[in-house]
């Protein structure tokens, strides 16, 4: 009681904000930024969040006219979407999160003031249920941990039914899954497979998480070069900002070569049901983990 420090005191330089939803700690960690929320590290500066924008936009079979990102985080995906010079809407549940945008991105405040920018403080699913807007790309970036209470509402079949109504003709959903055990991966994959006519999945760079692309329109089999050709100079520069490679082609190739079949994802736990609102596989994990430890 007399020696304990406040949670945020363990960090160095940073910003601490509190609101009715969460406590936000924006801090620097080694060479990458880190954003913490209610005692969980939820995001960092990584090319993964850039691919959440550029991968689905480059796969579209038509020039994009609008995009939506659910879960603002550090704002990296939002910033990457805006590099395509299209109207972009971001929906964030925690009011304080967008306020640290400028802590990680010096151009953050200017981007929020852009006429192409639309920031909404709301629950992402509730926003999609109420809006009548249509989007060419909807990208979902649920923060880890994947077991977090309530997070199943951003992976369920019922949620995907809502998204399908908000995608324009030929539109693409990019769903990021930050990991999870075999049952979670199979359950989320099955939910997407049963909700959309066409689904592809790629292991993220840095071997953390999965990018799902889902649509009711065929997803073109574009090469890395063809994807790169769809980028403007501004978007290409954004993709390479923290890139593991030196060209857009090689950057896209790093993800394309990590494609995984849906059957392979489901085969990891073939008995896992499709994730639904009343069957949140990801949130009920304790018994599975106990059994896995017992079998070792």
Image: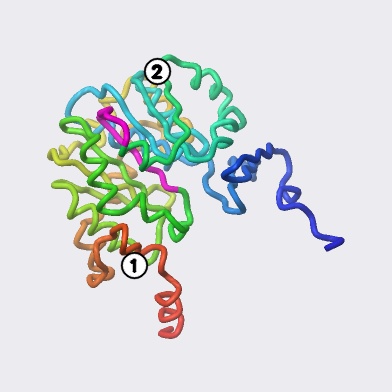
Q: At 22% across and 46% down in the image, what residue appears?
A: 161
Q: Specify which label sits upstream in the sequence, 2 or 1.
A: 2
* Residue furthest out toward the right: 2
Between 192 and 222, which is closer to the camera in this rendering?
A: 192
Q: Which marked residue is nearer to the observer: mark 2 or mark 1?
A: 2
Which numbered tag is attached to residue 116? 2
Task: Say which residue appears at 43% left-offset and 21% top-offset.
Answer: 117
Looking at the rendered structure, the secondary structure element under dot 1 is helix
- Magenta span: 130-142
Label at residue 290: none
| Pointer 2 local density, CA inside 10 Å: few below 14, some 14–19, many at least 20 | some
Give the residue pinned by disc 1: 182
Residue 140 falls in image quadrant:
top left
Q: Do tag 2 and tag 1 residues touch (Cβ < 8 Å)?
A: no
The C terminus: image quadrant: bottom left
In the picture, measured across the screen, residue 175 lies left or right of residue 93, that is left
């Amino acid at each position: 009681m007399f020696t304990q420090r406040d949670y945020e005191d363990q960090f160095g330089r940073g910003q601490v904000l509190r609101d009715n939803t969460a406590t936000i700690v924006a801090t620097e960690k080694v060479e990458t930024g880190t954003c913490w929320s209610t005692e969980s590290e939820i995001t960092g500066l990584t090319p993964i969040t850039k691919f959440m924008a550029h991968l689905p936009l480059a796969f579209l079979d038509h020039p994009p006219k609008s995009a939506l990102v659910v879960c603002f985080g550090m704002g990296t995906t939002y910033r990457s979407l805006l590099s395509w010079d299209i109207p972009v809407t971001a929906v964030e549940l925690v009011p304080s999160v967008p306020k640290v945008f400028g802590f990680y991105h010096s151009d953050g405040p200017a981007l929020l003031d852009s006429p192409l920018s639309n920031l909404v403080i709301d629950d992402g699913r509730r926003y999609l249920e109420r809006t009548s807007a249509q989007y060419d790309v909807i990208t979902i970036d649920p923060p880890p941990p994947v077991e977090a209470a309530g997070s199943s509402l951003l992976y369920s079949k019922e949620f995907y039914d809502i998204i399908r109504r908000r995608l324009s003709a030929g539109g693409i959903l990019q769903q990021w899954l930050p990991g999870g055990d075999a049952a979670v991966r199979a359950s989320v994959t099955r939910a997407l497979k049963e909700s959309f006519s066409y689904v592809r999945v790629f292991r993220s760079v840095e071997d953390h998480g999965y990018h799902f692309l889902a649509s009711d329109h065929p997803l073109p089999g574009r090469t890395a070069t063809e994807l790169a050709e769809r980028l403007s100079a501004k978007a290409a520069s954004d993709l390479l900002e923290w890139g593991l490679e030196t060209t857009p082609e090689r950057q896209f190739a790093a993800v394309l070569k990590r494609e995984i079949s849906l059957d392979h994802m489901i085969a990891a736990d073939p008995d896992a049901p499709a994730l639904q609102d009343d069957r949140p596989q990801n949130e009920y994990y304790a018994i599975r983990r106990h059994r896995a430890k017992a079998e070792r």
